Image: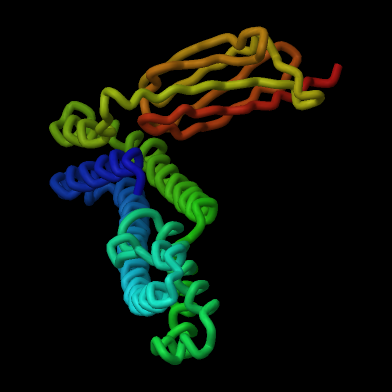
Amino acid sequence: MDKKFNSRFKMFGSTDEVLSLYNRDWSGYAPMVTAVEVFRGQFAGIGAAKEKQEKDIKGYAVSKKINRDAMADLAISICGKVKAWAKDQGDMVTYNEMHITRSMILNGRSATAKTLCQSIYNKAVGMPSAAKTTYNILAGHLASLAESISTYSESSFSPRTRIAMRKSETDSFKKMFTYCTLTLKESIDNLMENFAGTQFYNDYFNGRKIPTDATEKASLTVRVVSEYDGSPLAGVTVNGTDGVVEFQEVTDSQGRIKRSDIKPEIWDLTFTYTNYTTVTTQTDIYAGDKDKVLVKMKSIPK
């Protein structure tokens, strides 16, 4: 789970702790009971997804190490025999190419490890049949090495595949976090007004603060265009609020506004423009995000 999600996950946890601490204060208030049940169900779902991701990552790492160790063992066993044959034949090119150690295979990039083992396999396959027999390089040994290289290759996903998987997981997490945050923002936060002036109220909203690193500034860039032809709309009034802080901006000649150092939270945005239909939307911003929102406005027929 990314650091930005961990910060909000901690906020969910501290909020839940406050609710548990003041259980007597709200447990008799039916709307609050319902809202807290929804929140806790969502929070538990995120926790389960987080635990599964961590187990998957750990399991992948262990599996990859086991496959790499097995490949290295087979490759080095054959490498020594190819090297001995090359020396006896006076083939110093092959001899020098086979200066490959187990450490070289086990350390460094996955692609390098695979390349080294593949080179050992290729040299062994290319040896004369009689030489293979003499140096005890059996067909079964080569088949095992080939299978081991293939298994390791499958366990080492390509960078593109890893990026795609990571993006998919991040998108899934973000949706879960947004739904949980909305439950707090649109339900429990509002219900807490019934406890205004109490210690419960103060502790709740202190727990609701998302811990952020001062160095991780978030920004929001909004671009507003015409739904008809995609041209930028200048002069659109943009009102934003996170429920506490509010701002108002007007789009520039490129139809843009930009807010720096924006608070990580779900922001409600409203767009108004003469002779165009008003648009409302939400964006969930995390610490360190450079959030971008594209809004298309539809003109009102005359």
The structure residue drawn at horizontal position 81% and vertical position 25%, both measured from the top left corner, is 228
Where does the image place residue 236, in percent across and percent down from the top left? 64, 12
Q: In the rendered image of this protein, does residue 172 appear above or below residue 225?
A: below
The structure residue drawn at horizontal position 61% and vertical position 20%, both measured from the top left corner, is 271
Question: Can residue 55 be seen from the camera position used here?
Answer: no
Q: In the rendered image of this protein, does residue 274 appear above or below residue 150?
A: above
Location of the C terminus (image quadrant): top right
Q: Quadrant of residue 120?
A: bottom left
Where does the image place residue 124, in percent across and percent down from the top left? 48, 77
In the image, taking residue 136 as reference, residue 200 lies left or right, namely left
User: Which residue reaches farthest right?
Assistant: 302
Question: Can residue 207 be seen from the camera position used here?
Answer: yes
Where does the image place residue 91, in percent across and percent down from the top left? 45, 69
In the image, taking residue 204 as reference, residue 73 lies left or right, namely right
Q: Quadrant of residue 252?
A: top right
Where does the image place residue 137, in percent across and percent down from the top left? 43, 86
The structure residue drawn at horizontal position 75% and vertical position 14%, both measured from the top left corner, is 275
Q: Quadrant of residue 182?
A: top left
Residue closest to the eye, 205 or 13: 13
Residue closest to the eye, 277 or 195: 277
The structure residue drawn at horizontal position 25% and vertical position 43%, both measured from the top left corner, is 10
Count the marks.
0
